[in-house]
Image (cartoon, rainbow, N blue to C red):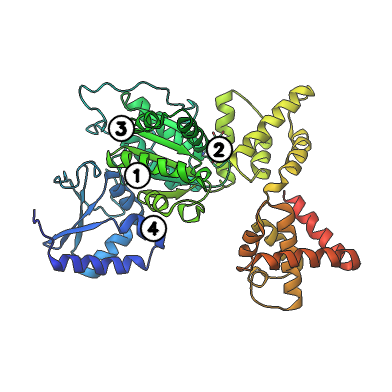
Amino acid sequence: MPSVVQPEVVNIWHNCLKIIKEHVNQQCFKTWFEPIRPVKLEDSVLTIQVPSQFFYEWLEEHYVNLLSKTIHQELGSNARLEYRIVIENKSTNNNSTPFTVNKPTHTNDAPGYLKKPNQPESAPKEGIKNPFVIPGLKKMQFDSQLNQNYTFETYVEGDCNQLARSAGFAVANNPGGTAFNPLVLYGGVGLGKTHLAQAIGNFAKENYPSVSVLYVSSEKFCNQFIDAVKYGSINDFINFYQLVDILIVDDVQFFADKDRTQDIFFHVFNHLHQSGKQIILTSDRPPKDMHGMEERLISRFKWGLTTDLQIPDYETRLAILEKKMHAEGIELPREVVEYISYVVTTNIRELEGALITILAQASLMKLEIDLPLTKKILKNFIANSQKSISIDLIQQKVCEASGVAYDQLVGKSRKREFVQARQIAMHFAKQYTESSLKSIGRAFGGRDHSTVIHACQTVSNLYDTDISFQQMVDNIEKQIKMSM
Ligand code: ADP
Ligand code: MG
């Protein structure tokens, strides 16, 4: 193995990256291509080094065509790609020689041996050793604080969570040993962050019994720290956290503006990361938007993989409901389940809430659950959750009702009809969402909060004085409410 990479190989790979960059978005490029290192070129075979098995599988699964095309373009049609996978735990010893495996890249029609990275059935691979066993050292005993029901088996996969779930599964199989450290899961309320983070913990605990897992909410971490300060036991607090092998900290946005908690967490984070321990964080927003958080913490959060959970589509909502019903032994007419999945679009917690509401009310009223009853019950439920309607939906409804195109609605033009539609949409965004004035302004082509205030006032004035305007606004409101 050459110890120095030939300059021409570096050049070739540099050119390949240029081509790849044109075909994938920036986040993808950063996540999947920047960490690759060129190793050597021999007989038209370019060897590249990737940080983990999972990484290799992900590239092969998602980017095999792009990679082959790129290599052919750079090196001619005979060229091939081989992978070298770093298996050793990167954070324990950076200088050790990586154990390497050469994997030939396969073409699209020969994916036979490729294990999908997201198969829940696959047990941890033989040969992956629990990275945390230190002979002779007695492990500390403590309760992991995990909810047993939050597992990969009960977690439904969909487009909305695919990357997060696959990365989570890789981490669960090889805690501290993948490039995904920390693993940061972010997304809106009720989209499955806590469930997924705990599934990783539960899986690792079950498969590597000697691994100590700890789940803690940021709020609890913060309160424990305050107590430790109060009772003079900060050292115990730090020592305790430093003994954990997999630390899951939920809702880290709670640390915002809590400088001393951030300091102590920074300390714990560094210690764990340096010792090759796994850190999993969840947040309601990506690290770059974590205001009130120290820059040095944010930059560490970006070290591993940051990935989001999105709102599930109809099919995934249906699958989640069915799984939930199956687990609880509930049976409902198909059309009822379809209807619930269709109308409850906000998040999974609300979806489950709707199901429970229907079951509860039907049993109270001693009625058989059918579609008309479901519609009746959900009418109230949906009205109550109207605060969670999105700005997107409001914009869509206003565009439909006013005949103004979306680009015009959020565009720069001061044409009267565009301005009016824009103001009405801002007014509803203020009324029906919990978004701040600032984020409403942002959703309308980057306007500032005073523009939103002005829009709301204008709509309210016109509404009181202009009958036809009033009718138009009422009509749009009806459309919005119907889609809630
Ligand atoms: P978050 O932490 O993002 O607010 P949770 O993890 O608490 O969301 O999820 C809310 C509810 O939805 C939980 O009951 C969880 O089990 C369920 N849930 C979320 N995502 C899924 C999924 N993909 N499959 C099955 N259930 C899910
Ligand atoms: Mg949560």
Q: CA distance from mark 2 to mark 4?
A: 28 Å
Q: Quadrant of residue 322?
A: top right
Residue sitting at x 28%, y 55%: 35
Q: Earlier in the sequence, mark 3 or mark 4?
A: 4
Of the image marks 2 and 4, the number of the one nearer the N terminus: 4
Q: Across the whole image, how many numbered discs are drawn on residues? A: 4
| Residue 277: percent from left, percent from top | 31, 37
Q: Is residue 40 visible?
A: yes
> Does residue 117 appear in the picture of this structure?
no
- Residue in the picture at 82% in, 59% down: 475
Residue 396: image location, x then y, percent: 68, 61
- The residue at which mark 3 appears reads as 124
Q: How far apart are the alpha carbons under marks 1 and 2?
A: 30 Å
Label 4 and label 1: CA atoms lie apart by 17 Å
Q: Nearer the viewer, residue 390 or 242?
A: 242
The image quadrant of residue 266 is top left
Q: How far apart are the alpha carbons under marks 3 and 4?
A: 26 Å
Residue 172, percent across and down? 36, 35
Side of 86 where 340 appears, left or right: right
The reply to whether callout 2 and callout 4 are in contact (CB within 8 Å) is no
The mark lying in front, picked from 1 and 2, is 1
Gap between marks 1 and 3, in whole Å? 18 Å
Q: CA distance from mark 2 to mark 3?
A: 26 Å
* Residue behind mark 4: 28
Which residue carries the number 1 mark?
Answer: 181
Q: Is mark 2 within 8 Å of ligand 1?
A: yes
To which residue does mark 2 refer? 319
Q: Amino acid at mark 3?
A: Pro
Q: Amino acid at mark 2?
A: Ala
Determine crowd level at label 4: few under 14, some 14-19, many 20+ residues with C-alpha closer than 10 A.
few
Mark 3 neighbour density, 10 Å: few (under 14) some (14–19) many (20 or more) = some
